[in-house]
Amino acid sequence: MSGNKLERITIYKAKDSVKSFSFIFDVTTESLPKFKYRYKDFNVEFIIKYSEVGGTKKTEADYPWMMMVNSLDSIFNFKFSTKNKTPSAVLGLKISNKTIGTKFFLLTFGMHTSRFINLDYLVSDFGIKVAMNICDQNNLKKVNTTTHSSISTLTDRQASKGASLDIFDINDEKEFFRAISGLTYDDYPYIKSFSGKNSITINLKNSVLVSKDDLIDILLSLDNAYGSDLYKNKFPTYGRLDYVSDTDKIENLDSILFERLKDKQLSNIHLSPNRIESDDVNYYTYEDPANHPEAIRFETLGIQELLDSHMLFTKKASINTVKHWRIYTVSTSDEISSSRAYDCLNFEVECNGTTFILSAGTWRSVNSDFKENIEQYISEKINENTNNYLPNDISIYCKVHENGVPKERYREDVYNSYVASNNKDIYLFDKSKITIAGNKQYEICDLFHSKKEFIHVKVLKSGTNSLSHLFLQARFYTDSFIKDSETRLSMRDFIVKNRNRENENKDSTLFLSLIPEKRQELHASSYSVVLCILTFDERDNIDNLPFMIKYELVKTHKYLIDERGVELSYAIRLVNKKSNAS
């Protein structure tokens, strides 16, 4: 290997339960090239899966912009043809002795190697934990975080040069580390830079790989780094969501998820992209559009649509059936990428007193102290609104026409209409178009009470992230009301020109007096926000709502009270599906 110019290696670590290469390769391993050798007191075995990938032929017909240009005039007749292939490989290593036992690693080179790897038998937090342990936290280059909440978001932050963690402005109350990149201390002289997620990618310094012995030393060094606890001091909030590594526990959680999917008990399950996407996403499909050009296109991901796109589960079906499903993303330039549907699932479940969350294909357990702190905060600092002007046992049934077809639906606007029609102190803003941030397309709230309460109403539905915008609305719209005079003027204009029958014969002068034009006449702390959650299940209460909804509630309360001086309360109301005819 002398003179080797290899600059980058991506490394995965197998779980301790792995007994052979066949566990971690998703292809038959018997015929793959392999060899053994001995280094110091280690027995080492290599195996490799080599492949040439790509090769799809493309012509000008595959590029809509070329077809458009060529159609402008016969003088334009541009031709294009390409058929590219590139090498790729997955290199497996087995290292063993009496001291360390047996350890398996995978090294990947080139593109599209994931098709040859069984991710279920790889350590999910190997890359991120190694990265946190080896990093110089004052020389970080890039930080990727996730907020797993009622709606999951991914955020990338990149510094122009090595920077401390403070520079990235991570919100410890809101974000969890997903991947980091940067530089190391001198303890790792072979690493120029690194990037860690589920795998660790290291950029090598020149001439560090003189022989295969050097490769073994690097792997063992990184494996030792994985076992270190240094990250607990560097990133003290990381442990709030601990990775689940026990295979039996993962299998049990997966079986619970599969039963929920099979029975279509979709509460606490939703889909979201498992990676940060560019702005040129055109649509999603649940079938390969290259083979099925007629596949139904979706603007957003939905768990019900995913299930509807596949056959009913057979008796032999299992979570592995779901793990073979793909979600395809098509860009505006018709580039196709795909992800495992399993990696896009977000699911929360409580098992034996512990809350578990599936996100980006990885199970995590919620730290018990963290969970207790959230629940204690709610019980001590967030009030439940029990006022009867938000009634129980109201039907939210309605009939609507969708594409000319009558449909039965259950919507919060039916509830809002009932409440406003039966209370002179409540003004209906549902369906209003209030100017916020220069755009006249928002509902400032659903209901506004004369006690200066902004009431936001959402139905808690199965199978959707139905509360995804409730907390965002509370923060964003409250900010706009307080800071933006144009928002308040738009609200006043809506009251003056009232077109809602529910608001007829109400004291418009009273409501106008509660919405001052000038900022200096507005006392933010005299206003409050109510989040009203409608449910069809009488068992629903604040205690049994999904943990991440409670987490969002706490974040929203902290923001409103700390930043705006506005109090937040919640209301959970039971509604029904009775039709007017019943």
Image (spheres, rainbow, N blue to C red):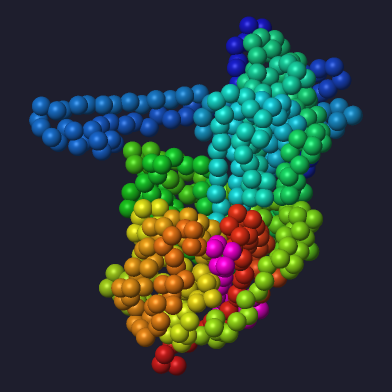
Residue 257 seen anywhere in this rendered image of the structure? no
- Which one is nearer the viewer's eye here, 346 or 278? 278
* Residue furthest left in the image: 74
Provide the residue span drawn in magenta.
Answer: 523-540
**Quadrant occupied by the N terminus:** top right
Residue at 59% over, 32% down: 142
* Residue furthest right in the image: 98
Residue 292 located within the stretch drawn in magenta:
no
**Hey, which quadrant is residue 418 in on the image?**
bottom left
Q: Where residue 461 sits: x, y (%)?
A: 53, 70
- Which one is nearer the viewer's eye here, 223 or 130? 130
Q: Where residue 576 sits: x, y (%)?
A: 52, 83
Q: Where residue 408 sits: x, y (%)?
A: 40, 79
Residue 569 seen anywhere in this rendered image of the structure? yes
- Which one is nearer the viewer's eye here, 446 or 111? 446
Residue at 40% over, 82% down: 507
Residue at 66% over, 9% down: 207
